[in-house]
Image (tube, rainbow, N blue to C red):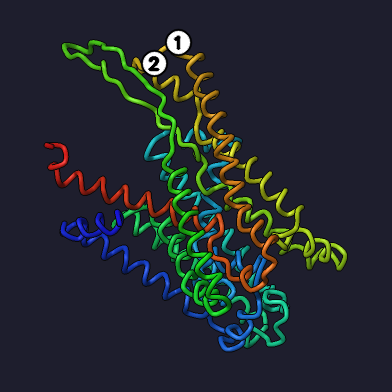
Amino acid sequence: MLMLTVLTRAFRVPELRRKLLFTLAVIGLFRLGQILPAPGVDVVAVRACVGAAKGGVFDMMQMLSGGAMLQLSVFALGVMPYITASIIMQLSAVVVPRLDVLRKEGQRGQAKITQYTRYLTVGLALLNAGTVVALARSGQLLPGCAQPLLRDDGLLSVTVIVLTMVAGACAVMWLGELITDRGIGNGMSLLMFTQVVAIFPGYMSRIFVLSPMSFVVMITSGLFLVAAVVFVEQAQRRVPVQYAKRMVGRRMYGGSNTYIPLKVNQAGIVPVIFTSSLLYLPTLAAPLLGDEARTWVELNLTSGAHPLYMTVYVLLIAGFAYFYVSITFNPVEVADNMRRFGGFVPGIRPGRPTAEYLAYVLSRLTAPGALYLGVLALLPLVAFAILRDPGTQQNFPFGGTSVLIMVGVGLETVKQIEAQLQQRNYEGFLR
């Protein structure tokens, strides 16, 4: 309801209306590229085999690519190469001094990091496209499919398909940057949101056909889950900060009260995405390790109902949550900036005591945040193990990753629209 109200108000402003229509047009072009098959792909065979590949890693590939990867489309790789490259660059800033210096140089340094991210995106796209096409060529992309997915598995044809997918990943990266510059919200986040939402109608229709009662229960539980995610995503600890008055020339500065907002889920969706990517790697590498290794991986690290899979999943999410928060929020740097501008936390001395206090608060917030991410990601897996309903398991759309992406991106986009509305309408401030 709030989103509809904000969109209605936004469409009344000509400039915002142009931005929203531009964003919708780019999203439509993005979905067209995800439907358009790559040259040399047997569309009839792919459509016939996709319906037989269900559960486990295949549902994850469908969700993270909007159904495009298993269909070998032009935009089959979607936004994942760029998202993975961005995460790697953020993690590398901790161990590579040059990247840390660029990060602190402001807009010029950020432009350099963005350029490096683009180069890394191309490399990851080439690796991902080569892996997907190799699996399709060997018949392991969709197990149980007897039909060849490629019309010609020669070297020239495979090279054309790989280059097409890499070019598609670069085009997706460009479309995301266009939305960020000329549209509303973060472009890559909106494209990821589009990928997740695109598969929902198909999933929900299959659930309704299998069991109308399961459909009603799933919709009800999904609404409660979304409400809980919104509540936690909005929760934050506000650390009060006071700025002392100081004279600069003939002017008095400072004397204001503000706060540092520390979210409960400070890491966002990154730990879940990174963990899903890591658990996807053993499945890809299993065919190359021999029959025994492949059997062990299929039994323990592919099925979400296996206790080992659940344990590794939760532990990796918690570990990445702590690690990501530690590299994205530096208490020492924040405390130094506060001291430089005359700010302090009431009752805490500036400098090192403030940094220790911020680190203490952040560690206490990260613990429930990591637990929240682990429980949210584990809920559908536990439900699958209890229900033991294959049809429902294969069509369950309310996974932790998908809900986090939808809620997080939706809330952030609405906040940006509201911020731009407030810049153009000061009626709320006059009240």
- Choose the circle earlier in sequence order: 1 or 2: 2
Q: Along the line of sight, which residue is nearer the eye, 409 or 393?
A: 393
Q: Residues within 10 Å of mark 1 (few under 14, many from 20)?
A: few
Residue 376 coordinates in the image, percent (x, y): 57, 50
Q: Which residue is mark 1?
A: 349
Q: Residue at x 67, y 64 (%)?
A: 387
Left or right placement of residue 284 versus residue 274 in this view? right
Label tally: 2
Coordinates of residue 120 in the picture (x, y in percent): 55, 54
Instruction: Point out the residue furthest to the front here.
Output: 213
Q: Is residue 37 visible?
A: yes
User: Rounded to the nearest whole Å, what is the CA distance between mark 1 and mark 2?
Assistant: 7 Å
Q: Nearer the viewer, residue 110 or 30?
A: 30
Q: On the rendered structure, is 382 left or right of 221? A: right
Residue 92 visible: no
Contact (Cβ within 8 Å) of mark 1 with mark 2 = yes
Which residue is at 67% across, 83% downward? 153
Q: Secondary structure at mark 2?
A: strand
Q: Which residue is mark 2?
A: 344
Image point (50%, 68%), residue name = 216
